[in-house]
Image (cartoon, rainbow, N blue to C red):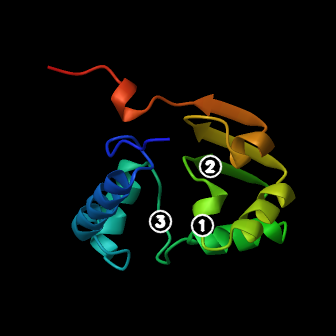
Amino acid sequence: MRRWPWIPGGPASAARSRRRAARAAARRPPIDDDAARGDLARAWGRRVLPAEPGRDTGQILAAAAAGDIGALVVAGVDPADLPGPAAALAALESTEFIVSLELRASAVTDRADVVFPVAAVSEKAARS
C-alpha cells in the first residue's frame, strides 16, 4: 500500500505535526504564569485553573488501566504507535466508556462505545 505524504499518518505528516506542536508550545504561556492562567480562567468563566500540568499519555493510560479513569476520548491514536502497545490495549480494555474520533476502523474503534467519523484533511472542502 502506498502512503501519500499529505495523508495523516504518513512520515511527512508526522514531522509537520511535531513542528506545529513545537511552535504552538512556544507560543503557549507557561502553566506557572499566574497572570496567563487568570486570563484563561476568566475567558472560560472559571474562578481558577490548576497550577500543575495534567497527565501525559503514559500517565493517562496507567490511570485508565488502574481503573482511576472511567472514560476516554481518543482521537486519531493507534495503540500500535505508542511506546507500549500491549499496555495501551489493556488500558482501553479497563476503561468503562470510550469515545473514538477516527478516520477508519482501528483497535480503538473496536473497543469504543461511541465512534465519531472524522474527515481527512484531503477530504475537507477547500476555502478560497
Sequence-first disc among 2 and 3 = 3
Q: Position of residue 39 (x, y in %)?
A: 31, 60
Tag 3 secondary structure: loop
Q: Which image quadrant is residue 90 in?
A: bottom right
Question: Residue at (32%, 46%) from the top-left corner?
Answer: 5
Q: Are marks 2 and 3 in contact (CB under 8 Å)?
A: no
Label 1 packing within 10 angstroms: few (<14), some (14-19), many (20+): few
Distance from disc 2 to disc 1, alpha carbons, whole Å, reads 13 Å
Sequence-first disc among 2 and 1 = 2
> Which mark, residue 74?
2
Hey, what amino acid is under mark 3?
Leu
Which of discs 2 and 3 lies nearer the camera? The answer is: 2
Residue 53 seen from this side: yes
Tag 2 secondary structure: strand
Tag 1 secondary structure: loop
Left or right of 125, for residue 55: right
Left or right of 82, for residue 86: right
**For this rendering, which residue is in front, 34 or 14?**
14
Residue 69 seen from this side: no
Hey, what amino acid is under mark 1?
Leu
> Which mark, residue 49?
3
Extreme residue in the front direction = 1
Question: Residue at (38%, 74%) from the top-left corner?
Answer: 31
Q: Which image quadrant is residue 26 in?
A: bottom left
81 in relation to 62, above or below: above
Distance from disc 2 to disc 3, alpha carbons, whole Å, reads 23 Å
**For this rendering, which residue is in front, 56 or 49?**
56
Extreme residue in the left direction = 128
The residue at which mark 1 appears reads as 82
Hey, what amino acid is under mark 2?
Val
